[in-house]
Amino acid sequence: MVKRSSLNGVTPGGHQPRFPGFDVLSQTHMWDPITAGVVLARLGPHDAVRFFTPSEQAIARALLDQLLDQREDPKVPVLEMLDSRLVEESTDGWRYEDLPEDGQAWKQSIGALDKDALDKHPTGFALLAWEQQADIIQAVQDLQSDKWHGMTASRVWSLWTRYACTAYYSHPWAWNEIGFPGPAYPRGYKNATIGGREPFEVADHHQVDPLKQT
Amino acid sequence: MGVLDLFRDGSADGVRDRNASAWLLPLGQDRVNHGLRADARRYDDTDELDAVIVGCGAGGATMLQRLARAGWRVAALDAGPFWDPDRDWVSDEAGSHGLYWTEPRVIAGENPVPLGSNNSGRGVGGSMVHYAGYTPRFHPSDFSTYTNDGVGADWPISYDDLRSYYGLIEGELPVAGQDWPWGDPHRYPHSPHPVGGNGEVFQRGAFALGITAKVGPVAIANGRFGHRPHCIYRGFCLQGCKVNAKASPLITHVPDALAHGAEVRPDSMVTHIEVDGRTRRATGVHYIRDGIEHFQKAAHVVVAGYSIETPRLLLNSASNAFPNGLCNDYDQVGRYLMVQGAPQTGGRFDDEVRMYKAPPPEVSTEDFYETDPSKPYKRGFSIQTVSPLPITWAEHVAGQGHWGHDLRVYMRDYVHWSCLGALCELLPQPENRVTLAEEKDRRGLPVAKFSYTMCDNDKQLIQAARGVMEEILKAAGATEVMTFQRYAHLVGGARMAADERHGVLDADCRSFAVRNLLITDGSVFPTQGSANPALTIMANAARVADRLTTTTSPT
Ligand SMILES: Cc1cc2nc3c(=O)[nH]c(=O)nc-3n(C[C@H](O)[C@H](O)[C@H](O)COP(=O)(O)OP(=O)(O)OC[C@H]3O[C@@H](n4cnc5c(N)ncnc54)[C@H](O)[C@@H]3O)c2cc1C
Ligand code: SF4
């Protein structure tokens, strides 16, 4: 019998309309220890922020909350995960010719975001209201492959979303939210057919076709 | 061997007699034969090897095993670790970052191609450690696209030169799949795997449209093979197979090589190939291991470092005799680098597909592989199942422009999506190439810069492939489809050609300029077809090893 605690079944923001009761952590006893160590570490304490300065930290956190729509606790600690990657220079192994290395590109681009905020508002990006931040971000996306503060906007966009998604969707709380069970070794799957489910998977209880909701 | 043994050990022919790798792995729950590694041969830098191999991936490890079997004194140096699937690999997407070559590289051109996790691996086993596992053959037409269609290039060899090697390697991996009707029709040693939700969707859609789709070909044993266990259908093939079910040279060729006296020297980055300026022969390689510089002497140097690192190494090996880079007298090194256009199309279904539950490689069609005279473009594409895990799927969704609330809504719908991928034959062009950037790596070596720009034929093919994938998914019942542009599979950059003005290597993959320097990875391809490249890289390396060992004797 697996004990449940307040650590079980957590989803970002605390809502779970689609896969009620689904809990990735209820299966940790089925994971190999090396994988369990790597995945469970994401739930533990994070290093203090080291890469970003305090003011950059505030801008980056606001940007990441926006990109991933994290408005309420509990939040996946995306800023802390990003900061660690940038300290470790754990890049994807390439950079665009017209952008600096990833860490520098992050600093440069959030600095530019703050400039855009100050152009229009009395405060910097981090202190703006949610909708005001969203408008500034949307304007960057709308530029597509045009230049934004000397950088190709679409490439900055790709940098932001790549790092944000990699951090968020590596977290067991995000897996609870989307119904994905996470590690599968050594157990594997037995019911890999359309509509098939393992005993520990939970059916989608509240289908919403994203086309109709977004 | 009796008939019963053939059944029990899963080999279709006398595989064990020519390559016993699968029987040299341990039975039980361990994935590494630690004794075999500990007792393996170790050469001194001052021993003149018959051959030193740079890179122990698809092309390098196949060479290593073949040369060791032929009695050659041979070592493979790899920049990355000697992986232990039990300790080093995890059943997790983000945690597998270390499998990729993530040292700095610069991408440029009008259609820059992301590298790293999208394209290249490191360590013993090379990029096949995290490849999906599709192992189709090239079609006979791939070897003469210039003659047939006036595009691309002709190879100095034909399909017939590779045919028997395809069969050998398919037995050694081994490959599972249905009888293959396309190209040169052939059968596979292992029967097809059962398919998961994503494969079912593809089959249903293809059937409705009259497109032929077949299960396979995948280098995942169906049933036990030697001491390798059966696949457990857990979907993490692109993160390294912790089960030893999916083939990579780490388990298909390295064990047999070690048992035949070869050495694998991990964590050894080759920085420079040494050439005697007077004789224009290679004398060995400089490498750095744990911060210390070494020089390994060898009578032959075989380079198999992947299509980016191979040209980079040649360019970084400039000398008085080769001021523009080794083997680069005619400015051919790094050119004609190719990548397949690999758009992926997702389709939404009311049913739960849960595509993460089976190996991503399941079902393919090659109905669109050949030039269709009724179309404005030449050459074609193949379509296969791909089953992205959440992080990769989120990149697709974000690639559609969704962010914030929309992104989360789409992602919460993950279990309802199915995904297909195309491989489009983009054409080789001289300006698509690797050069050296200003930027240096932490050793002080210039890093590679890769420029890529598509031509019109390329763009038309990608558009056509997208259309077919969307039709298949809709025919299967998808209520919404979305297509994400990407690239896959780098080959070329040091191609075989008829002469030194058109390429770097002759038909035996010896360089025109330095006769005892060979290249045996994907860099040697003059064209790429719409097939995933690993099987052809291995088959060609096996062919080159045969040519080398029949024309040259070990010392
Ligand atoms: C996500 C993904 C999925 C894929 N799926 C498929 C698939 O389904 N089917 C398929 O056929 N292909 C697939 N591929 C591609 C396939 O894996 C590669 O094409 C193939 O492995 C390349 O073989 P290679 O011999 O050229 O190089 P590799 O196998 O990459 O080997 C190169 C080796 O050289 C080493 N090296 C490089 N430079 C040096 C140096 N200077 N000194 C020492 N060592 C060095 C590297 O560490 C590496 O181990 C996939 C690739 C990716 C990224
Ligand atoms: S699905 Fe099968 S082949 Fe792929 S990683 Fe898992 S066990 Fe290995």
Image (cartoon, coloured by chain):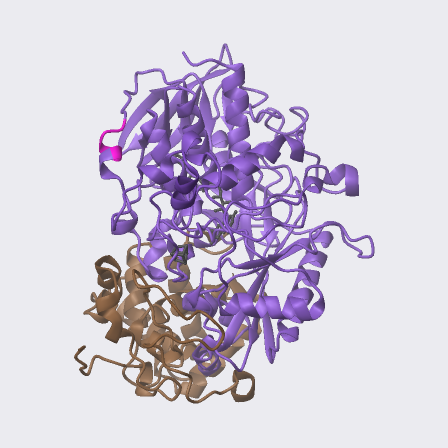
Q: What's the colour of chain A in the image? A: brown
Magenta span of residues: B36-40
Location of ligand 2 given as a quarter of the image: bottom left
B14 over B514 or under it: above or below = below
Q: Position of residue B288 (x, y in %)?
A: 31, 31
- Main SS, magenta region, reads helix
Q: Report whether residue A104 is seen.
A: yes
B516 over B340 or under it: above or below = above
Q: What's the colour of chain B in the image? A: purple
Q: Is residue B154 left or right of residue B315?
A: right
Q: Quadrant of residue B22?
A: top left
In the rendered view of the protein, which quadrant contains the C terminus of chain B? top left
Q: Is residue B311 magenta?
A: no
The furthest residue to the right: B374
Q: Nearer the viewer, residue A112 or B326?
A: B326
The furthest residue to the front: B3
